[in-house]
Image (cartoon, helix red, strand yellow):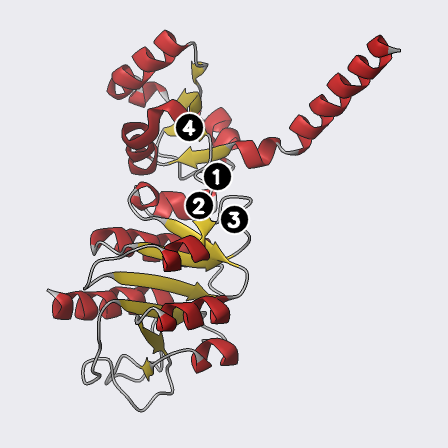
Amino acid sequence: MNQKTTSHVKTRGGSVRKRYKKQEEFTLYGWNACMSAFQARRESLLRLFFSRARAAQLKEVKAFCAAEKIPYRQLDQESLNKVASGIHHEGVVMVVRPRLPQSAHRLVRGEISDNGLVVVLDGIDNPHNQGGILRTCAFFGVEGLVLPGNGKVSAIPSSAARMAEGGLEKVRIFTSTDLASSLRDCRERGWFVVGADLNSDETLFAAKIKFPAVMVLGNEQEGLSDRVKQRCDILVRVPGKGSVQSLNVSVAAGIMLAEIDRRRR
């Protein structure tokens, strides 16, 4: 009877592990994304794949793999494309343990600097935009990036991590199941919430902004949701003089972060 029970547990455990394998592994590709991860958290590396052209540049990584008995393998271009599920891998792919995001509650309960800056994304699910914004957040020293989600899986997809060029390792990622409620909590802490709104009468460069600040961006189709707008202290737009009515959201994020960062310095 005990033997049957043990066998059942093993089988069930193996099934559970297979089911959640994707949650336990994350595929990174792109030179800067991979090397930043290796320098920041090499203990998370599970497997390494690379092209012949990258072999010499990966000497340190291969030595680490050999010492830690981590599988590594040189592949041809077609095989690398399959491992990365794309062609923009720049000759290196790393399978790592994911950086699971923390709850936005931890961000709000914690401390940020007096002139700190947090970015919140409302409905932005395009990986290229996510990655571009994440890279910009890392450049300007943003103290937290909040996205919708429950924190049980990586909030940033592999393609966004590549676009971030290592930014995934530099910015703390948080998730919230209710962005409006999280923004309410931020305001209760005394953080100033700035929302980007194309239709606002207030321009970014004329607006008065206090710190710590939270910058909220919506997607390019609908913008900020009504509930999120209601939680903002101010809504601003980036003024332009050309015939095109709007900016790509990652470009808008760069302009807004540059201006807000200028003020806090």
Distance (Cα) linking label 2 and label 3 = 19 Å
Q: Residues within 10 Å of mark 4 (few under 14, many from 20)?
A: many
Residue beneath the point at 31% across and 11% down: 63
Distance (Cα) linking label 2 and label 4 = 13 Å
Residue beneath the point at 21% across and 52% down: 139
Q: Report the residue marked by disc 1.
A: 86
The N terminus, quarter of image: top right
Q: Which mark is residue 32?
A: none
Mark nearest the camera among 3 and 1 is 3
The C terminus, quarter of image: bottom left
User: Which residue type does callout 4 highlight?
Assistant: Met
Helix, strand or loop at label 1? It is loop
Helix, strand or loop at label 2? It is helix
Q: Which mark is residue 159?
A: 2
User: Which residue type does callout 3 highlight?
Assistant: Gly
Q: Earlier in the sequence, mark 3 or mark 1?
A: 1
